[in-house]
Amino acid sequence: MSTLREDLDAGGDPRLAELSASLAAVRERIAEGARAAGRDPAEATLIAVTKTYPAADVVRLARLGVTDIGENRDQEAAPKAAETAAVGASVRWHFVGRLQRNKCRSVARYADVVHTVDSVRLAGALAAAAATERVEPLEVLVQVSIDDDESRGGISQAGLPAVVAAVVTASSLRLRGVMAVAPMSWSPTEAFGQLADIASRLRAEHPAATMVSAGMSGDLEAALACGATHLRIGSALLGKRDSLR
């Protein structure tokens, strides 16, 4: 079986060409969406969500200049991060899936940012893990449930202050902003507009909390129009696939 390095060093890599073309198309969408919103496209960071895709694709993306990588599941992300590091690729890992407290120690070892802190208990578990596993504080976003349905992930707006307080009082964590997924029954513009208001109020109290993680392949333009700073892009960049290859 060939190694990751051998696969990447093989000549005529069609997957690299495929990713390059997709990346150009996504970057054009981001540029057009930003311009339509009166924003500088450079204000938006593209996070390539590589769940179900191999470490080789992460390395290819890094070679193409995409160094912010998102993952949803620790059991996939942890070995992928190790493989990527082993071939010398330097990327910034974003954990963007629902996080179980028993996975906090593992995630704290490789993640640079966790987007999905949505309870006081999770903030406490992640703080304890980060204090043990890291030297530098772990950057976190508080995930907000726009429609206050916490069953899908995210804290209700009423519960937001308590989670924020749990993060900012933990020396091993650093509050960086908010994250949300548009509810299926809401228009993206309505959902992300509400998130923008929440983010603005948070920045008034915590000026360093400047990140707004919103928008995916289908609604990135609406997210940009509402001030998103980080876009979590999967299928538009990597294509649709059921399993690792």
Image: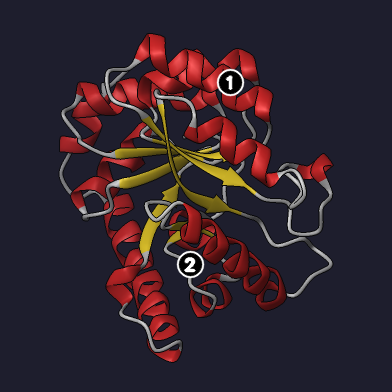
Q: Which mark is residue 228?
A: 2
Q: Visible in this render: residue 234?
A: yes
Residue 200: x %, y % from top left = 53, 66
- Crowding around mark 1 (Cα neighbors within 10 Å: few <14, some 14 to 19, many 20+) is many
Q: Which mark is residue 52?
A: none
Q: Is residue 47 above or below residue 150?
A: below
Q: Amino acid at mark 1?
A: Gly
Q: Mark 1 falls on what kind of element?
A: helix
Between disc 2 and disc 1, the foreground one is 1
Q: Is residue 163 above or below residue 178?
A: above
Q: Visible in this render: residue 218?
A: no
Q: Mark 2 falls on what kind of element?
A: loop
Q: Quadrant of the N terminus?
A: top left
Is 27 left or right of 10, judged from the image as shown? right
The coloring applied to the image is: secondary structure
| Residue at (22, 21) in percent of width and height | 86
Q: Is residue 7 above or below residue 234?
A: above
Q: Amino acid at mark 2?
A: Ala
| Residue at (39, 9) in percent of width and height | 132
Residue 103: x %, y % from top left = 57, 17
Residue 243: x %, y % from top left = 57, 36
Tell me the quarter of the picture where residue 28 sits.
bottom left
Residue pointed to by mark 1: 124
| Residue at (40, 70) in percent of width and height | 26
